[in-house]
Image (tube, coloured by chain):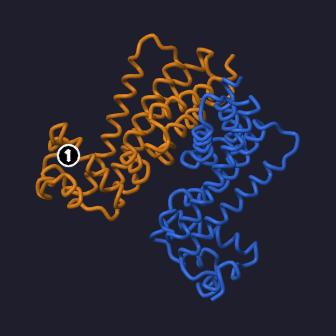
Chain colours: A blue, B orange
Amino acid sequence: VPSLDERRPPRKRDDEVVAAAAKVFYERGYADATVQGVADELGILKGSLYHYIDTKEDLLFRLFEKVHEDVEGIMGQVSSAEGLDPLQRVGLYIRLQVMHNLNDLERISIYYHELDRLGADRRASIVAWRRVHEKFVSGLIQEAQEAGLASRAADATVLSNCVFATIIWPYRWYRAGADGDAASVADACVAYVLRGIAGGAS
Amino acid sequence: VPSLDERRPPRKRDDEVVAAAAKVFYERGYADATVQGVADELGILKGSLYHYIDTKEDLLFRLFEKVHEDVEGIMGQVSSAEGLDPLQRVGLYIRLQVMHNLNDLERISIYYHELDRLGADRRASIVAWRRVHEKFVSGLIQEAQEAGLASRAADATVLSNCVFATIIWPYRWYRAGADGDAASVADACVAYVLRGIAGGAS
């Protein structure tokens, strides 16, 4: 049996499959959604979808992987941006991350609510990956603290959890159209976070 | 048929019932939990529990009501505290709210995840209540803005959502024992929020 990786469809198709799965899981709830429903959303036969996956859980796991690929892209951009001090780097990260989340509310909603649906091994791999992400953010904050640009009064881990809160929460309240465009929400979040971690710097 | 209100048990018993429901719903998941399980947790017969409620959903709704009663207590304390400027009032609110949430992670977890299990009318009443709570917080922030103590650059609604994020998120990452005591997490959140909304004040 080929692994999921070997059977992965071409990138564009893969994006479409995950987008369709996100939409169907979001609308019907993961528990009630079916592979047939995702195939219908894609306008293909269920058999064609089973060419890539064996189970509904495979679709869910691919959605999680896709979120991680995107966040890795963001972390890469932030790490390689030139001419930024550590605090500006935090700002760039928040902006990219909030914009990304607001532009894909359905997928992010699944990502934060359906972890328990994955089998133990996959769940463990997601949790391990989240640790890497958390370390990246707390690392940025620590650099800012060491450069005297962020408050040293609070622990970098607590601060980075406060930062995660600010990034993640918008998916719970933001409604496109009613709450302004994603860019201005992102700007407000960047300003809030930068003030939140910066004040009291020596 | 007497209403739920008329059948409400004495306060202490009511607290115990909700605490037991929170524990059982949290551990087994609401969908899999049973009224029998809650009765077992209380060490009483299922029939005694049915004296107060008709359905599992009644238990869930009572849990939601209890959260609201507690938050109303916090809002009352914040409103009636004397000698505080609007920004200090925000600080007091955050501190009380974070402490409260960290001391009752199971109940808060249910509160944020199981709203969809309630029937339409009850769900609507919870959503309406949440609006009152949001208005309270955005009102405090607006007062701080008008007093020149908080940034006017961002909309009070976006800022209050950032504040809610900081208050609510700890239930997703805080583990008692491993992450310091609730009071120091609350202090860090207060400092983060106050800096986050205050900076840039005229």
Q: Is residue A202 above or below residue B7?
A: above
- On the image, the x and y values in percent for residue B88 come to 51, 19
Task: Give the crowd class for mark 1: few <14, some 14-19, many >=20 residues within 10 Å.
Answer: few
- Quadrant of residue A164 in the image? top right
- Of A167 and B123, which appears nearest the observer? A167
Residue type of the residue flagged with mark 1:
Leu
Q: Circle 1 marks a residue in which chain?
A: B
Q: Residue at x 60, y 84 (%)?
A: A50
Quadrant in which the C terminus of chain A appears? top right
Mark count = 1
| A88 sits left or right of B136 in the view | right
- On the image, the x and y values in percent for residue A138 come to 66, 43
| A81 sits left or right of B50 in the view | right
Q: Is residue B188 above or below residue B173?
A: above
- On the image, the x and y values in percent for residue B171 come to 46, 45
The extreme right residue here reads A83
- Of A33 and A133, which appears nearest the observer? A133
Quadrant in which the N terminus of chain A appears? bottom right
* Circle 1 SS class: loop
| A134 sits left or right of A187 in the view | left
Q: Residue at x 58, y 37 (%)?
A: B162
Q: Which residue is mark 1?
A: B4
- Of A3 and A95, which appears nearest the observer? A3
Q: Residue at x 84, y 39 (%)?
A: A84
Q: Is residue A24 above or below residue B184?
A: below
| B139 sits left or right of B56 in the view | right
Q: Residue at x 25, y 62 (%)?
A: B34
- On the image, the x and y values in percent for residue A135 come to 65, 49
